[in-house]
Amino acid sequence: MPKPLALVTRSDAATEAVWKEALSDALPEETILSFRDMSAEQRAEAELAIVANPDPADVAELPNIQWIHSLWAGVERLVAELGPGAAPIVRLVDPELARVMAEAVLAWTYYLHRDMPAYRTNQQKAEWAPLDYRHPRDVTIGLLGLGELGKASAERLKGAGFNVIGWSRSSKTVDGVETMSGDDGFDRILGTSDILVCLMPLTAETRGLLDARRLKQMKPGAAIINFARGPIIVNADLIAALDAKHLSHAVLDVFAQEPLPAASPFWAHPSVTVLPHISGPTDRFTAAGIVAANIRQWRQTGQLPKTVDLKAGY
């Protein structure tokens, strides 16, 4: 009989129970136990941990796990907290997440493209002021990050008629998209994009990447959408760029501290739209199915799915 699998989260008991049910339905042949309910003996027996922002101290009490499967696509916090001695980590790669994120990228691109922030302001002033229409082909959308989320977003944006360009750390090819890499490519995408969409992972290299110098390189009047991680953008520098009217608007769905504190200047800033981290929610049913398939493959072949590069952070 397979040894138990440990479900380790920082979620409240009710939320964790929902995940446990979904995972158990997808893996009826396995015994999935919540870490908080496991005996010391069961913790010692566990071969694998399924995690969602786990407390590192809890993971440390699972001495014999061979690998860790994250329920989230973003794993920078997990990698940082578990440290270099962690068991191999597999992150969630879910086509449904890519579809939902691409949907959000298109939706909020339209929000900026069709001048919704300006019309909101005009409504507050009871001002009737139509703005000129811009055809999507005349609007350049720059994607920072060309992983699964970036590629799916590029496809949706292209289908809507936008001119799409993209940047990634290493050279990549995406059909119908002009792609670039390296420092020169980064400078070029900043200076070319009318709307810049951030979809990069948070790593040592990307933390604080969009600072005052980089924001000044952006096209005057450009807007930015951050659906990646909050610390990629330096908050004070972004506010300064918006106050100076160098940038027209920022749609922010991710922040260094979440929930966003009530004292944050982003809440009341007229050129900022605050979202409560809703651009790419994980679907527990598709996620559970992917986790189940990966675990079955491991049981049958002994081979792990692609694991996270701990040095790169993703």
Image: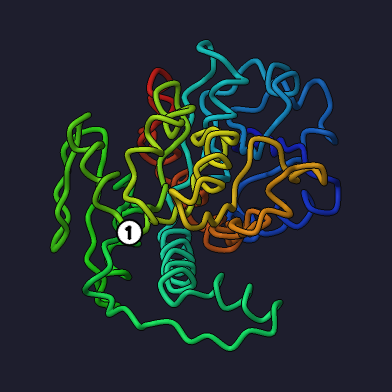
- Residues 10 and 312: in front is 312
Say which quarter of the image contains residue 279.
bottom right
| Residue 21 in sight in this render | yes
Q: Is residue 314 visible?
A: no
Callout 1: 10 Å neighbours few (<14), some, many (20+)? many
Residue 267 at x, y percent in the picture: 73, 53
* Residue shown at the point (40%, 53%) measured from the top left: 197
Image location (x, y in percent) of residue 250: 52, 54
Q: How is the image coloured?
A: rainbow
Please give the name of the residue rendered at 37% of the width and 34% of the height, measured from the top-left corner. Answer: 214
Q: Amino acid at mark 1?
A: Asp
173 sits to left or right of 165: left
Which residue is more in the foreground, 302 or 172? 172
The quadrant the C terminus occupies is top left
Instruction: Tell me the quarter of the image containing the N terminus.
Output: top right
Q: Secondary structure at mark 1?
A: loop
The residue sitting at the top extreme is: 85
Q: Which image quadrant for residue 284?
A: bottom right
Where is residue 24? Give x, y as percent.
66, 54
Residue 87 appears left or right of 140: right
Total marks shown come to 1
* Front position in the image: 38 or 73: 73
What residue appears at the point 20 percent right and 31 percent down from the top-left corner?
182
Q: Which residue is mark 1?
A: 194
